[in-house]
Structure formats: structure tokens, C-alpha cells
Image: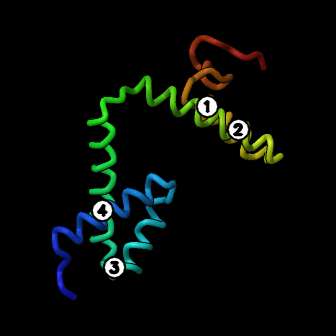
Amino acid sequence: MPRATATEIAERVEHLQGMILAGQSNTVCLTFARQTWGISRSQGYRLLKKAWAQIKDDINESGIDRQELLSWSIQTLMAAAGQAMQQKNPGAVVSAIRQLDHMTGTGYNSHRGQGVRRRS
């Protein structure tokens, strides 16, 4: 099988980047790459690594700071929790709240081991 051209590689990286940003896991992306382009697992990982690097570069170039990204993430998780409540999906509500707790450090478990003691 002939080697991919630089243009083909760039197109593949762009495609994988789109899949990642659409919420696809690395495993799904790797499987897609192997089945669609007939590449080896190691070649697929190289393309995935380039796609993730491109995402990181895009974020860095956009000038968005961590605080802005955190604010957007919180807003998105709150919207997701609201949608899950409307759909009567308690598991998704709990998951969104758990993630918010993890990101913001405001929950019960966030304070354990920091001088707060529980009685047995």
C-alpha cells in the first residue's frame, strides 16, 4: 500500500480532530482510522497524537485562558444537567453534578484530608 501524501495526512488529522471534538473516544477514532484508511495501529496512534496536538495548539492560539475555559465547562455541564433532568435521567444528572464537583472542588470529598475530620 502506498504511503499517504502530506495532504492526505493533514486531511486525516483534521478528520480525527473533528471526531475527537464531537466526543468520540480515542478507541473509536483509532478503529475508524484503521478500517477506513487501512493503516496500522501505530500509524493510527501517530495520527491521533497529531490531532490532539492540533487541538491543543488551536486552544493556545485562541488566547482563551483557563478561567474562561472553566467557566464555559461549568455552563455546559449545568446545561447538560438541566437537560438530563428534563429527560428524567437521574444517572446523567448525578454524573454532571459529580463532574462539576470535581472541577470546582466544592463538594464534600473536596475538603477531606484538609483539616476536616469526621467522627466515627
> Of callouts 4 and 3, which one flags the residue occurring earlier in the amino acid sequence?
4
Q: Secondary structure at mark 1?
A: helix
Q: Residue 37, percent across and down?
A: 33, 79
Residue holding disc 2: 81
- Residue located at (38% from left, 73% from top): 33
Amino acid type, residue under disc 4 in the picture: Val
> Decide: marks 4, 3 in contact (CB < 8 A)?
no
Residue holding disc 3: 37
Residue holding disc 4: 13
In this view of the protein, which residue sits in the foreground, 35 or 64?
Answer: 64
Residue holding disc 1: 100
Question: Which quadrant of the structure image shows residue 108?
Answer: top right
Q: Residue furthest right?
A: 88
**3D distance between C-alphas at marks 3 and 2:** 38 Å
Image position of 60 with respect to 27: above or below = above
Image position of 70 with respect to 115: above or below = below
Q: Residue 15, percent across and down?
A: 36, 64
> Decide: marks 2, 1 in contact (CB < 8 A)?
yes
Q: Count neighbours of disc 2 (C-alpha within 10 A) and say few if under 14, some if 14 to 19, many if 20 or more.
A: many
Question: Which quadrant of the structure image shows residue 3?
Answer: bottom left
Apparent side of residue 55 relative to residue 100 in the rendered image (left or right): left
> Of callouts 2 and 1, which one flags the residue occurring earlier in the amino acid sequence?
2
Amino acid type, residue under disc 3 in the picture: Trp
- Residue located at (41% from left, 57% from top): 18
Closest to the camera, between mark 1 and mark 4, is 4
Q: Residue 34, percent across and down?
A: 37, 77
